[in-house]
Amino acid sequence: MIKPELRHTAIRDQQFAGVTYHIEGELVPVLRVSLGQAPIFFDHHILLWKSATTRIGTKAVRGLLKRAMGRMPILLCTATGPGEVAFSRDGAGQIIPIHLQPGQGIHTREHQYLAATGQVAYTITRARGIMNWVLGGNTLLIDHFRAEGGPGIVWLHGYGNVFEVTLAEGEAIDVEPGAWFYKDPSVTMTTITQNLSAGLLASAVSFFWNRLTGPGRVGLQSLYVPPSPGAI
């Protein structure tokens, strides 16, 4: 039986991919990253504080036209040590660290990543099926992250509580369109429609789900908050 498990993310002194990081806080969590020479990149509006010695720069990303059409930032900020930098998003939830070995990737809902280490490549694709984004709020694009040239980390912010399930080959779970949060690239996603036909009024009602089929991990969030124009 498929049973998504609640992820617990309070972390202190975790070391990976050339950085040390901490995740703290219960309602609106904060990610703190202790930096050496390995840089990280992030969207500018989620920066909470930084050390005076931490340098902030910019990073161009691939697919500028596609990103501009999707109201995505075409320039990202970078942070380089020595020092510490902290991030948070304006919403209650959980921060999820995704550790990637070279060649590994993760697909995420747009506008919900916080930061990533410099070894991670960042691209976007369009979600297939109009119902994936019409009924899912604003999910026209899917963020793709992939570790290249070394291990990397992607930190994500999930709204509400975050659950994770690992699907076996051919195993599937149906998810409300606003609830899927991240998935392994090996997991496929299709739109499922069910029309209710019991009674006169029910005949006009339809349910829509994202069907995610394994193998691989799927992250689910219990609350979906569409990005505001000021946060894009």
Image (spheres, helix red, strand yellow):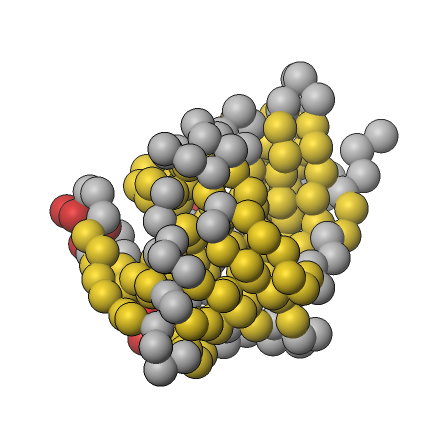
Q: Residue furthest left?
A: 65
Q: Is residue 204 visible?
A: no
* Foreground pick, 94 / 117: 117
User: How many numbered circles are shown?
Assistant: 0
For the point 62% across and 66% down, the residue is 23
Task: Give the residue drawn at x 41%, y 78%.
Answer: 50
Q: Quadrant of residue 184?
A: top right
Residue lying furthest right: 1
Q: Is residue 2 left or right of residue 111?
A: right
On-image quarter of the C terminus: bottom left
The answer to which image quadrant residue 77 occupies is bottom left
- Image spot of residue 42 (x, y percent): 36, 61
In this picture, is 137 found above or below 176?
below
- Work out whether residue 129 or residue 99 is closer to the camera in this orientation and state it: 99
Q: Is residue 20 at least partly visible in the picture?
A: yes
Q: Quadrant of the N terminus?
A: top right
> In the rendered image of this protein, does residue 145 appear above or below residue 94?
above
Q: Residue at x 33, y 44 (%)?
A: 122
The picture places residue 178, in percent across and down from the top left corner, at 55, 52
Indicate the position of residue 2 as horizontal and vertical percent values: 79, 33
Tell me: 16 left or right of 76.
right
Q: Residue 134 location in percent, x, y?
A: 42, 50
Residue pictured at 33% horizontal, 41% vertical:
121
Q: Is residue 45 above or below residue 107?
A: below
Q: Quadrant of residue 143?
A: top left
